[in-house]
Image: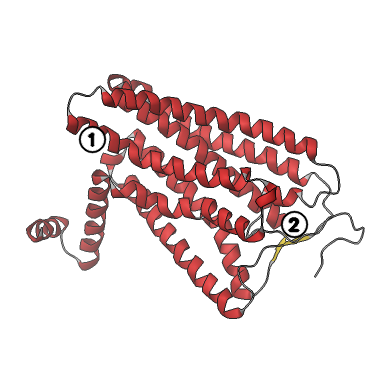
């Protein structure tokens, strides 16, 4: 094991936290993570393909949902494959460069996802509170600009944190209490006093993320006020359930991330860190497709039409015949 370079001041590799010590449990971890990963790939891939192929879904809401699925695919692909490979090959090592790349990509995608969820809150606000101006405020160019701003802000935020973290001299060990590389774990190995850097990072992050959180809250305050003024009960029900998937995703994202990064050090332990990191890095990307598809009849209909069309092409049956057969069966 090469923990440090010959001058004793720099780490050349890190050791990720293992989920299990015995070979049987390592293989169980591999198959469990493989199942979750394949489910996330399938769910997000179906949403991306359906939205891209069905022109009826080429609207701002589904455009942002497509971007969300792309970010979810990237997030889960950044952490799980390396963890699965380590369990399969019975190793814990990740190179210094690999750790820096993993931290940057993961932080980039997670930050971009949070900014995108803020944009999606604005989309719901305009759709419900200003429906007559929806086409003007959320035209195709405006949607592209807002999505690009979310991706770009995430990139700059990740670049700032990664450069700040890995510019520190690291020499106090190399064993991470985590199954992937993240900022708080790396800062523990710094040879210098990191207090001022940590405070500066917290202030910058708090300013960005608190601003987005306040915007989301204010948007939904206005949305609920508008929904309560709808005279029809069916109209209120429809408007509320249009926003419900986004609310659930925001709550799932924020609750797990806040527990991961804001929990007191006094209650920190390797097992707790492992559970919390799993909740905020693996669970949201895997569940988001299910959350968005459960109450979205338009998306389910488009997905059914896409699958029916593909099956018809595979067996050489005309799409109209397959659709007729499906309607007769229903």
Residue 110 point in image, percent of width and height: 55, 44
Q: Identify residue for label 2.
A: 96
Residue 141 appears in the figure = no
How far, Cα to Cα, is label 1 from label 2?
A: 52 Å
Q: Residues within 10 Å of mark 2 (few under 14, many from 20)?
A: some
* Element assignment for label 2: helix
Q: Is 147 left, or right, of 108 in this rendering?
A: left
Q: Is 63 left, or right, of 275 in this rendering?
A: left
Residue 106 point in image, percent of width and height: 59, 49
Most distant residue in the right direction: 7
Q: Is 136 left, or right, of 156 in this rendering?
A: left
Residue pictured at 60% horizontal, 39% vertical: 155
Q: Residues within 10 Å of mark 1 (few under 14, many from 20)?
A: few
- Name the quarter where the N terminus is drawn: bottom right
Residue 11 appears in the figure = yes
Image height check: is 271 above or below 112? below
- Name the quarter where the C terminus is drawn: bottom left
Q: Identify residue for label 1.
A: 237
* Element assignment for label 1: helix
Which sits earlier in the primary sequence, circle 1 or circle 2?
2
Image height check: is 151 above or below 310? above
């Amino acid at each position: 094991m090469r923990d440090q370079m010959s001058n004793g001041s720099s780490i050349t590799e890190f050791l990720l936290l293992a989920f299990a010590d015995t070979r049987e449990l390592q293989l169980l971890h591999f198959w469990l993570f493989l199942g979750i990963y394949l489910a996330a790939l399938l769910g997000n891939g179906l949403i991306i393909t359906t939205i891209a192929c069905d022109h009826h879904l080429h609207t701002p809401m589904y455009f942002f949902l497509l971007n969300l699925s792309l970010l979810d695919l990237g997030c889960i692909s950044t952490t799980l494959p390396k963890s699965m490979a380590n369990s399969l090959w019975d190793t814990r090592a990740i190179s210094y460069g690999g750790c820096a790349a993993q931290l940057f990509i993961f932080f980039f995608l997670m930050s971009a996802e949070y900014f995108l969820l803020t944009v999606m809150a604005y989309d719901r606000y305009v759709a419900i509170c200003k429906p007559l101006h929806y086409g003007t405020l959320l035209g195709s160019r405006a949607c592209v600009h807002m999505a690009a701003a979310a991706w770009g802000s995430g990139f700059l935020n990740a670049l700032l944190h990664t450069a700040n973290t890995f510019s520190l001299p690291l020499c106090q060990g190399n064993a991470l209490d985590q199954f992937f590389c993240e900022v708080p774990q790396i800062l523990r190995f710094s040879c210098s006093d990191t207090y001022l850097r940590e405070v500066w990072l917290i202030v910058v992050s708090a300013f960005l993320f608190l601003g987005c959180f306040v915007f989301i809250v204010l948007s939904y305050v206005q949305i609920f006020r508008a929904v309560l003024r709808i005279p029809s009960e069916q109209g209120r029900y429809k408007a509320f359930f249009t926003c419900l998937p986004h609310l659930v995703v925001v709550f799932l994202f924020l609750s797990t991330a806040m527990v991961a990064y804001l929990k007191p050090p006094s209650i920190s332990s390797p097992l707790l860190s492992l559970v919390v990191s799993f909740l905020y890095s693996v669970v949201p990307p895997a569940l988001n497709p299910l959350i968005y598809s459960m109450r979205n009849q338009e998306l389910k209909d488009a997905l059914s039409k896409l699958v029916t069309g593909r099956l018809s092409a595979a067996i050489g049956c005309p799409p109209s015949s397959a659709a007729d057969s499906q309607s007769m069966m229903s």
